Amino acid sequence: MNLYALTPGDEIRRRIEKIQHAMADAGMPAMLVTSNANIYYTTGRVINGYVYIPATGKPLYFVRRPTGIQNPDVIYIHKPEQITGHLAERSIILPEAIGFEMGLLDVMTYDRLTKAFGGIKALNASPVLRTARAVKTDFELDMLRRSGVKHERVYQRIPHLYEEGMSDIELQIEIERISRLEGCLGQFRIAGESMELFMSNILAGDNADSPTPYDFAMGGAGLDPSLPVGANGTVIKPGMTVMVDSNGNFTGYMTDMTRVFSDGDIDDLARKSHQCSIDICRSLEKAGTPGTPASQLYELAMSIVNERGLERYFMGHSQKAGFIGHGVGIEINELPVIAPRSRDVLALHNVIALEPKFVIPHVGATGVENTYIVTEKGLECITNSPEEIINLN
């Protein structure tokens, strides 16, 4: 069994080098990677175990499961307390400090890991990993483009799935079915505390105005208090919109795309707001060059919204989101964040989703979401499905 699965070894080495450069900038002599998303990033597969990355030199992979991985840098262990002994056997001197994913570790695991390293000084590796992952390699960009193409194919079929009298959840089930048949992995990885979502967020009519506890651009009451977001069983009727924000994970790298559908015509305010969203995307595509502050993109979007008198409905109505975009990749909500107080600055080959959306009472949600690659000339869209409101009939 190959450690790197389907990811070329050279690609993994490039990622490790990026992390090591970020470690050097942060003054971090070593780190221990523990989360599934970052283990996947540093190995090309998910393992139960740990990735030990020194500031210079090759990483070591301490694995519990699965068995059978053949690699000279893989060391099988039963518990983390064995790690330091194996480092000593390889004549590796313990550093004075080590980085842990403090943004993700629970207290008990953190205590156990720090004790396993003899009470070593602990540093926060989470920002280092997020920074390294924010700039995608050519291999990652290819994975994202491939997801974008498959994502588009699913959306092209949505009007053919609709039948009169359907509820939002019935339409969602059909969309998710064809997504899986197209190759969607089903998994929806979300970076952030306590944010959960199933494969899709389908919002029909006034359910789009239902507040959710999660920091999403759009909410929805959901079907059960255990997952209070998304479709709630609303029957789709003429005059309401149906916003489809469906899973784009076809390669382990996720594209994010939203499109709006309707059963018949909708009112002028809804159409005006939807066109405003499209116009915001066109403006930000030109402005989103490397070196641009993320907050500047947000300000540009708000200026367009204010010029058209739509601020009451922008990014929610009864409850508003405080951002209009975010990084995407292995997870949703990576860096950079497009928000008014964001300190992020766009870098070449960042990948971001822009989602300037509106909620119009008694109609529903409007607006588009696209995934973009930051290039020297601006933002390159990789989710090129038609953006106008599409009639389901």
Image (cartoon, rainbow, N blue to C red):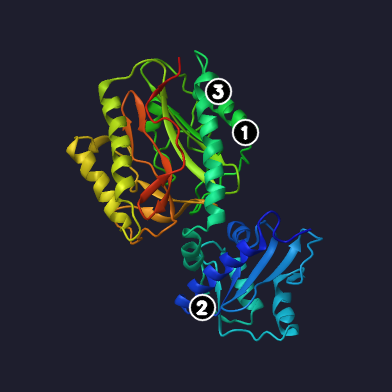
Amino acid type of the residue tagged 3 in the rendering: Glu
Sequence order check, earlier mark of 3 and 2 = 2
| Residue 330 pos. (x, y %) | 55, 52
- Amino acid under label 1? Glu
- Mark 1 crowd level (few <14, some 14–19, many ≥20, 10 Å Cα): some
Is any atom of residue 234 visible in this view? Answer: yes
Q: On the image, numbered disc 2 is attached to which residue? A: 28
Dot 2: what SS? loop
Label 3 neighbourhood size at 10 Å, few (<14), some (14-19), many (20+)?
Answer: some
Q: State how far apart marks 3 and 2 are (Cα).
A: 50 Å
| Closer mark to the observer between disc 3 and disc 1 | 1
Helix, strand or loop at label 3? It is: helix
User: In which quadrant is the N terminus drawn?
Assistant: bottom right
Q: Is residue 79 left or right of residue 187?
A: right
Residue 227 % position (x, y): 53, 39
As displayed, is residue 381 above or below residue 98? above
Q: Nearer the viewer, mark 3 or mark 2?
A: 2
Viewer-side residue, 375 vs 71 = 375
Quadrant of res 4: bottom right
Q: Amino acid at mark 2?
A: Met
